[in-house]
Amino acid sequence: MGFKFNLKLVNLKQVMPLLSLLLLFPVAVMAIDELNTADQLALKGYDPVSYFDGKPVKGDPAISSMHNNAEYYFISQKNKDRFRLMPEKYAPMYGGFCAYGVRMGKKLDIDPLAFEINDGHLYVLLNRATHKMWKQDMEKNIQISDMLWPQIQIKSVDSLN
């Protein structure tokens, strides 16, 4: 007694929308909280290029650019152009979550004024106290965060905190 599958009974037009949803579902799950954004806004509206110029400055919503599903604001068209040429250089590490939080296996929000640039990378932190802890052994903290980020990147904030 075997099971026979009759393709004539399956209406492909009815099944395709369901299959499409099933294929998209894992992508949607993976996208959960990969970036620290409120309404897709990265760095709480601060211009990522301005960090590399020495002082973070709030960007202008009229001068914006999307990168990896996050919107970045800029203080000038020049900064926007610099970002668009090399977004990986200017975008914050760990999806814009607190770098020290990632070291602890968590996804924490940031104070955009608590930051560190090391080896050409932007690390944002929860607050000044966390920034101080991050700097105490920055190289080791970066190693640990780099190791943990791939594991926690696809997990929701709620599942980690």
Image (tube, rainbow, N blue to C red):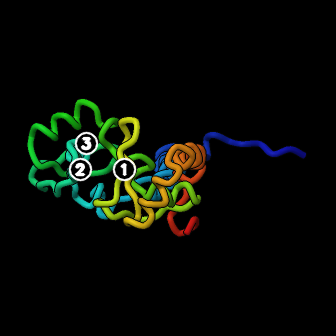
Q: CA distance from mark 2 to mark 3?
A: 15 Å
User: Do tag 2 and tag 3 residues touch (Cβ < 8 Å)?
Assistant: no
State the residue position of label 2. Answer: 72
Above or below, comparing residue 100 to residue 13 in the picture: below
Q: Is residue 22 visible?
A: no
In the picture provided, is 72 more to the left or to the right than 20? left
Earlier along the polypeptide chain: callout 2 or callout 1? 2
Residue sitting at x 27%, y 61%: 44
> Please, what is the three-letter code of the amino acid marked with disc 2?
Tyr
For discs 2 and 1, the disc positioned in front in the rendered view: 1
**Residue in the foreground of this view, choosing between 86 and 103:** 103
Above or below, comparing residue 124 to residue 65 in the picture: below
Q: Residues within 10 Å of mark 1 (few under 14, many from 20)?
A: some
Q: Quadrant for residue 61, please give it.
A: bottom left
Residue sitting at x 42%, y 57%: 97
> Please, what is the three-letter code of the amino acid marked with disc 1?
Glu
- The quadrant of the picture occupied by the C terminus is bottom right
Q: CA distance from mark 3 to mark 1?
A: 10 Å
State the residue position of label 3. Answer: 52
Residue sitting at x 54%, y 62%: 106
Q: CA distance from mark 2 to mark 1?
A: 19 Å
Q: Is residue 88 visible?
A: yes
Residue sitting at x 57%, y 53%: 152
State the residue position of label 1. Answer: 116
Q: Residues within 10 Å of mark 2 (few under 14, many from 20)?
A: many
**Residue in the foreground of this view, choosing between 135 and 161:** 135
Q: Residues within 10 Å of mark 3 (few under 14, many from 20)?
A: some
> Please, what is the three-letter code of the amino acid marked with disc 3?
Phe
At mark 3, the secondary structure is helix
Q: Which mark is residue 64?
A: none
